[in-house]
Image: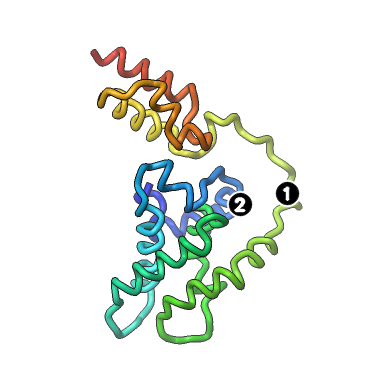
């Protein structure tokens, strides 16, 4: 998860804006249950903040404790409305679209600008001039299909059952489907 949603992928999000806006995505607040990692959302936001700092010419040392605290505040305030793609788009466009007038790196500005400018900016985007494309079948959607199958295979090897996989948050929120569970079972049955 963290490998895909990193500052190194900002250019992808800028170049594929419409695709990112329309991609199925989970909210930051859902990550803890989906990945059984209560710190994941905070880690993602902290990596975004650190990436912003690295892209500036700030002459002072960034304070990791302040970055962590800002990440916690971001998730607490916006985690239920901000998806992982919203996060990527916000941070990818931050210095061009949202940054306040301060010339120094200001982590508090990140919180202020998301609330005041991001949603307005997102609503202002208009892709309606383009013809509506048919929506792909769920199994073809960009959501790490192969990675989900690998995760299922790993969990099945650890002794979990298909019913255990169906009880997890990934299945509950629609990120994991029956076809992926079946494919993982097929892979596992052919490797023994």
The local crowd at label 1, few if under 14, some if 14 to 19, many if 20 or more residues have their Cα within 10 Å, is: few
**Left or right placement of residue 117 versus residue 93 in this view:** right
**Left or right placement of residue 52 versus residue 159 in this view:** right
Residue 161 rendering spot, x and y as whole percentages: 35, 21
Q: Which residue is mark 1?
A: 130
Q: Which mark is residue 76?
A: none
Residue 171 rendering spot, x and y as whole percentages: 48, 32
Are the residues flagged by discs 2 and 1 in contact, CB closer than 8 Å?
A: yes
- The image shows residue 47, relative to residue 58, as above or below, that is above
Name the residue rendered at 44%, 25% in the picture.
180
- The image shows residue 44, relative to residue 168, as above or below, that is below
Task: Kindly report which numbered mark, 2 or 1, lies closer to the viewer in this rendering.
Answer: 2
Name the residue rendered at 49%, 23% in the picture.
178
Nearer-N-terminus badge (2/1): 2
- Residue at disc 2, secondary structure: helix
Q: Splitting the image into 4 quarters, where does residue 39 fall? A: bottom left
- Residue at disc 1, secondary structure: loop
Q: Which residue is mark 2?
A: 18
Residue 140 rendering spot, x and y as whole percentages: 53, 31
């Amino acid at each position: 998860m963290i490998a895909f949603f990193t500052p190194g992928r900002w250019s992808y999000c800028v170049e594929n804006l419409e695709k990112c806006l329309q991609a199925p995505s989970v909210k930051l607040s859902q990550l803890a249950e989906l990945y059984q990692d209560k710190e994941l959302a905070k880690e993602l936001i902290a990596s975004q903040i650190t990436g912003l700092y690295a892209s500036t010419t700030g002459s002072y040392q960034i304070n990791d404790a302040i970055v962590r605290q800002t990440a916690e505040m971001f998730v607490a305030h916006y985690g239920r409305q901000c998806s992982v793609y919203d996060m990527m788009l916000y941070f990818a466009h931050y210095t061009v679209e949202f940054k306040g007038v301060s010339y120094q790196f200001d982590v508090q500005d990140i919180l202020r600008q998301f609330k005041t400018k991001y949603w307005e900016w997102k609503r202002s985007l208009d892709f309606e001039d383009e013809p509506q494309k048919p929506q792909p079948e769920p199994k073809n959607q960009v959501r790490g299909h192969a990675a989900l199958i690998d995760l299922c295979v790993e969990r099945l090897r650890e002794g979990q059952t298909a019913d255990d996989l169906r009880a997890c948050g990934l299945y509950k929120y629609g990120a994991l489907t029956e076809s992926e569970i079946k494919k993982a079972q097929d892979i596992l049955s052919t490797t023994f």
